[in-house]
Amino acid sequence: MTPELTPSQTIGPFYHFALPFPGGERLVDPDDPDVVHIAGTVYDGAGEPVADAMVEIWQANRSGRYAHPEDDRDELPLEEGFTGFGRCPTDAEGRYEFVTVKPGAVPGPDGRPQAPHIDVLLFARGLLRQLVTRIYFPDEEAANAADPLIASIEDPDLRSTLIARHIDGALQFDIYLQGENQTAFFDV
Amino acid sequence: MAQRSSSIVGYRRDDAGAPPPYLYPDYKATRLRAPEKPLIILPHTLSEVTGPAYGHAKVGALDHDLTRQFEGEPLGERIIVHGRVLDGDGRPVRNSLVEIWQANAAGRYTHQGDRHPAPLDPNFGGAGRCLTDHEGRYRFITIKPGAYPWGNHYNAWRPAHVHFSLFGPAFATRLITQMYFPGDPLFGQDPIFNSVRDPKARERLISSFDLETTEPEWALAYRFDIVLRGRDATPMENHK
């Protein structure tokens, strides 16, 4: 008999003393020549910032390699110290920020490349299970247009929620939990 | 360049009944936070079958023992919380990070946002972590957490619980959940527990008292096995 899954429960509001860790939002050195700052605010359905959420990201390195045994494309270099994992609690204004690099393209269905992207998990009080979205990059128009996952979304407004915006030298990726601007969330 | 993407084996979505809905109005905070638009199916790619397998773990020798992280011993009922982390095919999830956090024996978190007028314990932080072993086993020593009130509805109390965070082998297996204690009289009025609609799935959130692991003259034991998603099919032996 196969065992049955353990259900999810909310992270709740009181995780801060346990889960965040020093440097959790910093995947590369801020002096890295390829550094990218990705920041955003999480908003609830009333337009209020969500001050008790936790954002996690998972991404390939700049050459498109994941630091994981199942990515055995040895022709692409691993980077020492680059785990590809980040964790950042939102602050009192609902903001998070990661210091990272743009990942290289990684293969998707049928071996076609996916546009460079970062997988995002969002946890919060009031979320009985995590939400999943992706951050894509605004300077990758051609790759974004050819990306099979983006293409699978019919509504162009919903599609556009996945693409970060260039603002003041940083990338902004706000997350809207509800409403007409709601971010596209995935069933993973 | 070899493209192994075509041989990616995803994780099963056979979790009917287990996950709670996003919108569960009895739990008021879901009303403004549950997404309204349908989720978009994301066929698993290399991005989802990989993941932060070891998280950020540099696990310290006492990280699993919440009773020995401060000068003195915390107040409350010392307990052992242990179990196995398995995948959906019953295989152990090895060398994988397990993080826990909880209120103290009086039902108070060491968190500035917790306004419950119950005492803090200077000898209890309430956070722990460990790695699963080769059999998927984990083990914590802690204090039985207290129930605490919250503002969800009149006279709302959370049943005693320990929060668990698990990674498993892939992005697609990430799980945050809560472990409860058997026979808690507060289950019936708790919308977070009851948000899991399938009663059998709900039972899987409740630990079992474990006399065999209970240590004489020292601590009661509770067992909590955790099952993460399984793979669609056996991964190919050689997908180079």
Image (cartoon, rainbow, N blue to C red):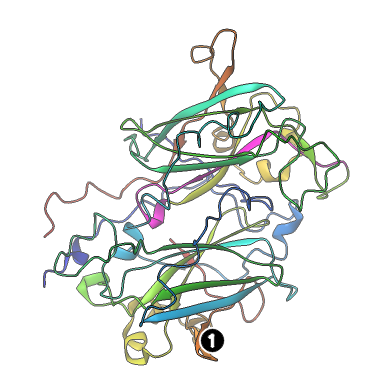
User: For the point 67% across and 56% down, which residue is it?
Assistant: A125
User: Image point 75% across, 73% down: which residue?
Assistant: A46
Question: Is residue B115 visible in the rendered structure shown here?
Answer: yes
Please check the rendered image and state whether residue B171 is part of the magenta-colored stretch, yes or no: yes
Residue B98 place in picture, x, y as percent: 47, 41
Which residue of the protein is positioned furthest toward the front in this rendering? B71
Report crowding for label 1: few under 14, some 14 to 19, many 20 or more residues within 10 A (C-alpha): some
Q: Position of residue A173 (x, y in %)?
A: 54, 79
Q: Which residues are magenta?
A: B155-173
- Indicate left or right for A175 with A143 as reference: right
Instruction: Say which amino acid is labelled 1.
Output: Asp
Q: Answer with left or right where residue A112 lies relative to residue B183.
A: left
Residue in the picture at 35% in, 33% down:
B133
A172 within the magenta span: no
As helix, strand or loop, the secondary structure at mark 1 comes to helix
Q: Quadrant of the C terminus of chain A?
A: bottom left
**Occupied quadrant, residue A152:** bottom left
> A134 above or below A165?
above
**Which sits in the foreground, B193 or A58?**
A58
Query: Looking at the picture, does residue B10 appear above or below residue B140?
Result: below
Q: Does residue A179 lie above or below A50 as drawn?
A: below
Q: Residue B67's x, y, as percent?
A: 60, 28
Q: Chain of mark 1?
A: A
Using the image as rendered, state which of residue A47 and residue B229 is in the foreground. A47
Give the residue number, with chain letter if any, for mark 1: A157
